[in-house]
Image (cartoon, coloured by chain):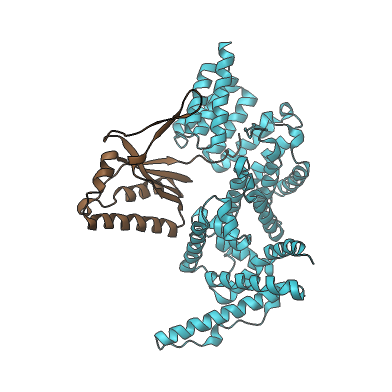
């Protein structure tokens, strides 16, 4: 086997095997940080041994065994150290691994690992990093590169996350039924953050970065295969696919942003669209509808329109009505105002923005100004639209978006003076 | 979210630094090293640099043919960037807290300098969707 094809195959194997192996080792030894080190060592041993001697029949069991041996060695030396330091002797047998490798299920372990990495005790950025490391099987260097921070910084973030989990004493088992919905919500939120980070960064010099959206979709597929009947899991996978499908169309040749209405729809990825639509259609018919499903349904309505003017806006509006009742999230209210403006006219949309002003949660947020500018332009009030495009440009923290908003203002003021 | 924390000091401030007692200079340097170490360990440090003193600073403009025209020797009252940190944090409040820590770096006699630290968000990639 050439080293390149081995590398490609090994990479695939690691990413498949790392989470269940890590899960199995944590299950036995109850120490996340040490288990992670042991699994890394086992993977390293495999990189040396497997190309020479061939991949074992049960690579997972092989890795669990090697990692467990490392853990036992680690515990033994730890015990010896403790014995030297105090007289407290612990029976090694109590922590020695059981021999029931085959009885444990990979599936549960991967899920438990996900619940652990996305634990509410962690900050979002720590949960994201830990999930990519432990469940995604990415190296610390790859994750650091993806978030444009130094490797040492990312290593610290991951290591602190592992210690937070250890300190919080979360048991390595599936959450109880009571906790489950809430904890699954946290898992989906982390996956959503990973996807978005990749999606928003997919222009310019950042193209060289590790493809986080693809990674999020891969992990989401794994969760979906474990929980195929969960509507929100299916909904988020569909949302990711339908959003990712527009990737090639959302920026122009000079990396400028192109809004949905102006995108060249022939560039949309039809394979992702069909898969996304099939997923969301199947889950919507099952009842119990959540926010990810509704967002995916909106994305599906857009995806189904061959031209922007063919968009079924009344349906988009109906979906945002539902979302608005469900979440009360001000960003949803903003999107609801846009759909209202298209269906019932810009003045009705602008009235909704006035209610959002009173609500206060979006005060000073550039999106409120950008949407107001857009609706004012629709209403033909160009001077006010220009003013709000400029306010929005001053408030956004996204460079491509600032360029877009300033260009909008310039375009309008030139056409107004003509 | 990433923020840059810019520590600005008067040119006169740089000059005065050379006249601090040795112990105070050492305390100040140790404080800055400790701050960087803490930020590295918390997983928040992206970059930190101190800049050379302004004695050699030049302001450069392009002349008519594009050749550099340099300007130098600045008045005592001019403010200079002394150094900066780029941090990756969970919230703006956290960036302000780090800036306040840096601002309180010890000066002569160990008293906090209360230097002004300008905090600016670093622009990121495009928004979620237009």
Q: Position of residue A310 (x, y in %)?
A: 74, 28
Tell me the residue at 59%/29% (across/down): A338
Instruction: Return the x and y of residue B82 as percentages of the image width and height.
Output: 35, 44
Q: Which of the two residues, A191 or A38, is positioned nearer the viewer here?
A: A38
Quadrant including the C terminus of chain B: top right
Q: Quadrant of residue B36?
A: bottom left
Rendered residue at 71%/28% (across/down): A308
The residue depicted at 55 percent of the width and 55 percent of the height is A144
Counting from the top left corner in percent of width and height, residue A280 is at: 72, 46
Q: Is residue A5 left or right of residue B12?
A: right
Q: From this viewpoint, which residue is outermost toward the top?
A: A418
Chain B rendered in what hue? Answer: brown
Residue ranking furthest to the right = A1
Q: Quadrant of residue A49?
A: bottom right
Chain A rendered in what hue?
cyan
Count of marks, rendered view:
0
Q: Is residue A375 above or below residue A93?
A: above
**From what the image shows, is residue A281 above or below residue A2?**
above
Vertical side of A25 occupied by A87: above or below: below
Can residue A224 be seen by looking at this rendering? yes
Q: Is residue A177 left or right of residue B2?
A: right
Camera-side residue of A368 and A43 = A43
| Residue A152 rendering spot, x and y as whole percentages | 50, 59
Q: Name the one closer to the observer, B9 or A369.
A: B9
- Report which quarter residue A410 is drawn in: top right
Q: Is residue A381 visible?
A: no
Q: Is residue B1 above or below residue A418?
A: below
Is B71 left, or right, of B106 in this rendering? right
């Amino acid at each position: 086997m050439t080293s390149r094809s081995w590398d490609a195959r090994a990479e695939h194997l690691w990413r498949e095997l790392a989470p269940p192996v890590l899960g199995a080792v944590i299950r036995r030894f109850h120490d996340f940080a040490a288990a992670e080190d042991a699994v890394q060592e086992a993977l390293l041993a495999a990189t040396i041994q497997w190309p020479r001697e061939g991949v074992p029949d049960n690579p997972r069991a092989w890795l669990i065994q090697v990692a467990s041996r490392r853990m036992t060695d680690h515990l033994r030396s730890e015990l010896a150290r403790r014995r030297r330091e105090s007289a407290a002797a612990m029976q090694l047998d109590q922590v020695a691994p059981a021999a029931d490798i085959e009885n444990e299920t990979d599936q549960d372990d991967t899920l438990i690992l996900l619940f652990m990495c996305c634990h509410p005790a962690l900050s979002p950025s720590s949960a994201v990093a830990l999930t990519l490391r432990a469940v995604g099987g990415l190296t610390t260097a790859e994750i650091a590169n993806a978030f444009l921070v130094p490797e040492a910084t990312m290593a610290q973030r991951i290591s602190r996350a592992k210690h937070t989990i250890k300190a919080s004493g979360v048991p390595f088992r599936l959450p109880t039924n009571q906790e489950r919905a809430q904890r699954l919500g946290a898992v989906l939120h982390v996956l959503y953050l990973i996807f978005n980070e990749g999606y928003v960064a997919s222009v310019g010099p950042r193209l060289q970065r590790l493809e986080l959206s693809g990674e999020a979709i891969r992990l989401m597929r794994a969760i979906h295969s474990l929980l195929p009947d969960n509507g929100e899991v299916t909904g988020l996978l569909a949302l990711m696919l339908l959003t990712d499908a527009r990737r090639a169309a959302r920026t122009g040749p000079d990396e400028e942003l192109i809004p949905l209405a102006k995108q060249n729809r022939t560039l949309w990825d039809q394979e992702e669209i069909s898969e996304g639509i099939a997923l969301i259609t199947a889950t919507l018919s099952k009842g119990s509808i959540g926010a990810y499903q509704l967002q995916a349904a909106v994305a599906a309505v857009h995806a189904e329109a061959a031209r922007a003017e063919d968009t079924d806006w009344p349906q988009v509006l109906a979906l945002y009505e539902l979302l608005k009742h469900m979440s009360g999230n001000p960003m949803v209210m903003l999107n609801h105002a846009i759909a209202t403006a298209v269906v019932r006219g810009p003045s009705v949309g602008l009235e909704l923005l006035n209610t959002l002003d009173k609500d206060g949660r979006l005060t000073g947020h550039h999106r409120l100004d950008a949407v107001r500018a857009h609706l004012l332009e629709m209403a033909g009030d160009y001077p006010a639209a220009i003013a709000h495009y400029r306010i929005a440009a001053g408030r956004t923290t996204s460079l491509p978006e600032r360029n877009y908003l300033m260009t909008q203002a310039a375009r309008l003021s030139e056409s107004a003076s003509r | 979210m990433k923020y840059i924390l810019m520590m600005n000091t008067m040119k006169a401030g740089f000059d005065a630094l050379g006249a601090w007692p040795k112990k105070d200079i050492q305390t100040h340097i140790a404080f800055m090293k400790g701050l960087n170490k803490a930020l590295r360990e918390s997983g928040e440090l992206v970059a930190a640099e101190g800049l050379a003193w302004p004695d050699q600073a030049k302001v450069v403009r392009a002349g008519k043919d594009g050749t550099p025209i340099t300007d130098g020797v600045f008045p005592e009252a001019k403010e200079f960037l002394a150094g900066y940190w780029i941090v990756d944090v969970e919230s703006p409040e956290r960036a302000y807290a780090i800036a306040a820590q840096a601002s309180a770096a010890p000066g002569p006699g160990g008293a906090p300098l209360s230097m002004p630290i300008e905090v600016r968000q670093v622009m990121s990639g495009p928004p979620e969707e237009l």
